[in-house]
Amino acid sequence: MRSRNGRPTKRALGPSDPIVGPQEQDCYEGERLGRLLESIQGKIEAERNLDGSVLPEKIWLKQQFAIGVNEVTRLLERMPPYTEECSYNGKADAMSSNKKTTLLQVILVASDCNPRWLIKHLPTLASSRKVPLIFVKDKNRGSLRLGEIVKLKTAMAIGIKAKGNAINDILNKILFSHDLDQEKRFGVN
């Protein structure tokens, strides 16, 4: 449709409009989603116990994750654009211009986000930084499932920071194995 001045009219995104269409392999739902979240949750608990820090749980979680769309966007924008000499696959503390930059290993996004434009920018921003995006699709409960990971009621987006710990190891194995039946081997011991 065109407006009176000849320009195309802008229309709001509806619930059936794709965001920048997640590919099938990037979308976790059903039993596959359950296994993914269970293995991440198990590694979080194991890493927290192994860390032995006296920090409160909420502060410890903020050190491991970027929680919320704003914080994920902020970290993505501060990350240097992807080049061949720097890769972000779970390596800890990359240096950029003599300044420490927090890198994201992977971003989990709830596909039930409403309004959709809240997360519309994440796929393009993540692809420019070569950070994989995983869409959590669980009817209308994706944001609730993500919130469970970080001990909140809901979360639209969670970025896992590349710290080189057990959480990053399990995600590397899941992301690069391409065989979800292998998740059982990498999951909670």
Image: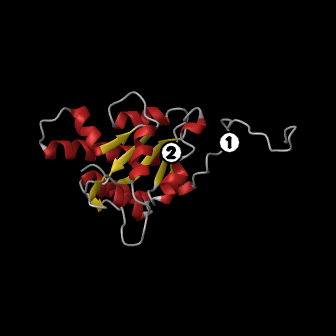
Picture residue at 26% right of the left edge, 47% below the top: 43
Query: In the rendered view, would you say 149 is above or below 95?
Result: above
Residue 145 position in % (x across, y down): 43, 35
Residue at image coords 42%, 68%: 83
Q: Secondary structure at mark 2?
A: loop
Q: CA distance from mark 2 to mark 1?
A: 19 Å
Q: Secondary structure at mark 1?
A: loop
Q: Which residue is mark 2?
A: 29
Q: Earlier in the sequence, mark 2 or mark 1?
A: 1
Please report the residue visible at 39 percent of the width from the left and 27 percent of the height from the top. 153
> In the image, 105: left or right of 100?
right
Badge 2: residue crowd in 10 Å (few <14, some 14–19, many ≥20): some
Rendering coords of residue 55 (x, y %): 16, 35
**18 relative position to 159: left or right:** right
The 10 Å Cα crowd at callout 1, few under 14, some 14 to 19, many 20 or more, is: few
Locate residue 114: give its quadrant.
Answer: top right
Outermost residue toward the top in this view: 153
Q: Quadrant of residue 48?
A: top left
Q: Which residue occupies the foreground of this view, 111 or 78?
A: 78
Amino acid type, callout 1:
Asp
- Identify the residue position indicated by label 1 in the image: 17
Residue 64 lies left or right of residue 24; in this view the side is left
Q: Amino acid at mark 2?
A: Glu
- Nearer to me, 124 or 139: 124
**Would residue 83 be found to the left or right of residue 112 on screen?**
left
- Residue 101 in the image: state x and y as whole percent: 31, 54
Q: In the rendered view, would you say 172 is above or below 12?
A: below
Which numbered mark, 2 or 1, is in the foreground of this view?
Answer: 1
Q: Quadrant of the N terminus?
A: top right
Task: Classify 173 as above or below 64.
Answer: below
Number of numbered tags placed on the structure image: 2
User: What residue appears at the point 42 percent right and 50 percent down from the top-left corner?
Assistant: 76
